[in-house]
Image (cartoon, grey):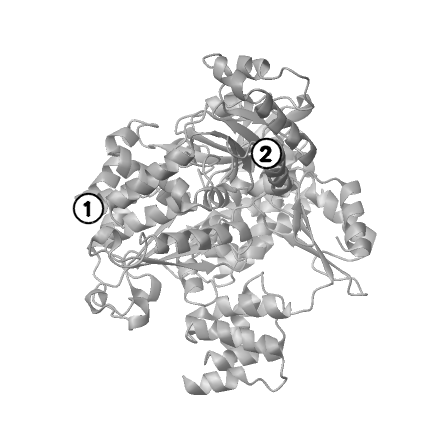
Amino acid sequence: MPIAQKISTVHPSGDKRFRMLAATMKRYQYAPDALIEVLHQAQELFGYLEEDLLLYIAHSLKLPPSQVYGVATFYHFFSLKQKGAHTCVVCMGTACYVKGAANLLATLEQQHQIKAGETTSDGQLSLVTARCLGACGIAPAVVFDGNVEGHQTSESVIRRVEECLYHGS
Amino acid sequence: MDLEELNAIASREHHKQQKTCIRCCTVGGCLSANGLAVKEQLEKAVTEAGLGKKVTVAGVGCMGLCSRGPLVRVDPQGTLYDRVTPDTASEIVASVNNDAEAIREVEGLSFEETSKACTPRPLKISPSQYQPNNHPFFTQQLKIVLENSGKIDPEKIEEYIAADGYQGLGKVLLEMTPESVIETISRSGLRGRGGAGYPTGLKWATVAKAKSERTLDSRYNGGNPHNALSRKFVICNADEGDPGAFMDRSVLESDPHRVIEGMAIAAYAVGATQGYIYVRGEYPLAINHLQKAIRQAKRLGLLGSQIFESPFDFKIDLRIGAGAFVCGEETALMASIEGKRGIPRPRPPYPAESGLWGCPTLINNVETFANVPTIIRKGADWFDRIGTEKSKGTKVFSLAGKVCNTGLIEVPMGTTLQQIVEDMGGGVPDGGKAKAVQTGGPSGGCIPAAAFDTSVDYESLTELGSIMGSGGAIVMDETTNMVDVARFFMEFCMDESCGKCIPCRAGTVQLYQLLTKIREGNAFLTDLEKLEEICDMVKYTSLCGLGQSAPNPVFSTLRYFRDEYLALISD
């Protein structure tokens, strides 16, 4: 598919990340069924999926934009909005819920004045819930900037989020 | 690769494994509890003590007792240490060093005595009170699926081969016909471990009989014209969406080759050449281990073309889920593999006739495939002897919630919930009392403490209004409000409904609102009637399993804990 390749390697913005995305699509031979794999890669590269990016993917894989948008909005993993600099994911799986995850979430919501799924106005913290992280053995579990930590309490989540925000860890 | 080479790898590996080994869990809960740092410290301490030649340190998969992680086991004695920190890790090495000789002298003593004899100087760490040889958490288990978990390094194919890995695949390819493989699986009585319990042998036989009407382009058959007429697929459903279940995650992280071998055997039996593993995006480590395992198997010629120098070709690709619970439903899962929105379609036609890209497709759960290599190796009769009359073999449960020992257990079918919760789980912490066990996730139900003497098998759990499900077992104590639990699951189903059929899309919203109304104490008896009515409607008219089973938690809590509903209702 020479046309698709030509378009994909030379993105007008000159952003190098597009080249990496194009390489992924090439690896899947621009197959339409690789859409979810491509979206995973795009989100990893760009952090979230903005409209332009979805259009670019639709064009490259020769899919209608409606289908790409439909898939991107169907799956919880894909985000169409920019996330905060730090993320805190509270697991709301059954085991965590039974062990008081709802309280942890309420504490964090109150502390930072945002609801689950929102980002603070300064763009520093996103508060997210997860369905189940599979870390039920150490419930309740919370993920701070990618690190899963178990046996959390209201005090420990507040402290850990502060640490993430002010010390970057 | 042929059998001789396989055996050569195994014996080389056996040779290496002679010396003392300190095994540290580096997956799942232990990883989150700083298991990697513990392992690094163990390695450092071993090097510093100059024990490099006598003692190896290995990162292994799940040992089961996740709540006490990070776990470290010193083999060959099998002494378990729990809640190990990088500080205490050096102490473990010190105790091994002190007693390398002593251990040999006291061999033949019980583990407890050994560990006592092995501590001539006071150490800052003592072995865990949960020893694999005497604590019921371990002794009441029977491990088939988890036989290698916590014993082998999941990132090394050689260790799996040394544990008789890929022998089953060798056996089927060199000695058995596809028909006899299916016959063996049918005779073993293995049933699907994804929840519904459909007989695995029957499913395989249907796919084997199905004729593919489609010829696909060369991309899907490796350019092999021989396969063009018989396009079939094998899919491993590793989209473990049930909240509170982590068995599949653990198996994939701890022993990924077992699943790959099981899939290859299935592919040979049904005549497929391409497999997919659809794994949750939330499990990065499982994905990583699977990718490594597939690469290694390819390198050794255990995946690819002409496996074991037979005409059998098989290739596996990974597909990463993107966070949709409904994708655990097989038709939705296939839509997702095809790159579409994960929306189910009506069955029939079943995937066995028309599945992925319209071709006959075999879909089994991780645990089902993980049982296969052992059944082939040890025979159908061996497997048939384990379990109850209608439910054979073992079941892996993830024990979590309000229970002392949370983690992963594998018990023979027919074990009672009492044994699981009280003996193995150690009961509710702080002297509380267990009120119910929730099995089967959002599709299952709550089993009250009064019914804990029921044996765990597909039929008895269904009779109690719950299901076996994938194997999550969440213990709830007296402080848990059952209306709240029902509402929690309904909220889950409401969010996860794909929106295709109205009973599920609108019904779950109505049910959630009614449950909220009851929970907040604003409901009347008529609301309870309406709740039951809508539950029935959603159950009988929804398109797929998600909707059909969404009311189950409400049904079962109403059945056993109706008084809790009534207590919240003003009359």
- Image quadrant where residue B525 sits: top right
Q: Please, what is the three-letter code of the amino acid marked with disc 2?
A: Val
In this view, the residue in front, B204 or B529, is B204
- Residue B154, compared with residue B330, is above or below; it is above
Q: Position of residue B295 (x, y in %)?
A: 41, 56
In this view, the residue in front, B258 or B320, is B258
In this view, the residue in front, B52 or B86, is B52
- Residue B211, compared with residue A149, is above or below; it is below
- Image quadrant where residue B271 sits: bottom left
Total of numbered circles in the picture? Answer: 2
Q: Quadrant of the C terminus of chain B?
A: top right
For image coordinates 44% across by 56% down, the residue present is B278
For image coordinates 25% across by 34% down, the residue present is B380
Is tag 2's residue or tag 1's residue first in the polypeptide sequence? 2
Give the label, 2 or 1, closer to the camera: 2
Q: Chain of mark 1?
A: B
Q: Chain of mark 2?
A: B
Q: Which residue is mark 1?
A: B174
Q: Residue B357 vs residue B540: left or right?
A: left
> Can the viewer see residue B283 in this picture?
no
Secondary structure of the residue carrying tag 1 is: helix
Q: Residue B104 vs residue B121: left or right?
A: left
Q: Which residue is mark 2?
A: B46
